[in-house]
Image (cartoon, rainbow, N blue to C red):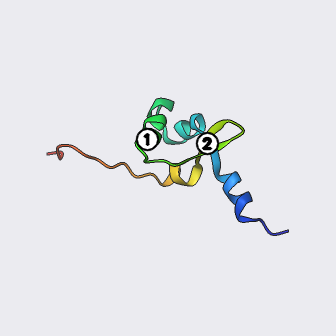
Amino acid sequence: MPRTEKTNLVDDLISQAEAARLRGVSRASINDLIKRGRLTTTTVAGRLLVRRSEVENFQEDRRGPKAK
């Protein structure tokens, strides 16, 4: 049976805690990225989830002074 687009999206959703473990950062850091609009969220059963693919492919935007 072929998988639908909706099924793929649901399989791609993870908790903020799992996202933090995946990136090796704190849950607060993931929450900050969400607040700044760097990660998109989906609410499922009252839980705020993020896409695993976005977390894995996230590239830091290094702002500030350049390293010497």
Residue found 43% across the figure and 36% down from its top: 32
The front one of 55 and 48 is 48
Residue found 17% across the figure and 47% down from its top: 66
| Amino acid identity at mark 1 | Leu
Q: Which quarter of the rendering shows the C terminus?
A: top left
Residue found 40% across the figure and 42% down from its top: 36
Q: Position of residue 58 (x, y in %)?
A: 45, 51
Q: Residues within 10 Å of mark 1 (few under 14, many from 20)?
A: few
- Up-down: is 9 above or below 63? below
45 relative to 30 in the view: left or right: right
SS label for mark 2: strand
Task: Identify the residue under disc 2.
Answer: 49
- Up-down: is 32 above or below 5? above
Residue found 49% across the figure and 41% down from its top: 23
- The extreme bottom residue here reads 2
Lower sequence index among marks 2 and 1:
1
Separation (CA) of disc 2 from disc 1:
13 Å
Q: Position of residue 63 (x, y in %)?
A: 25, 46
SS label for mark 1: helix
Q: Residues within 10 Å of mark 2 (few under 14, many from 20)?
A: many
- The extreme left residue here reads 68
| Amino acid identity at mark 2 | Leu
The front one of 7 and 19 is 7
Query: What number of labels is visible?
Result: 2
- Up-down: is 42 above or below 16? below
Task: Identify the residue under disc 1.
Answer: 33
In which quarter of the view is residue 17 placed? top right
46 relative to 58 in the view: left or right: right
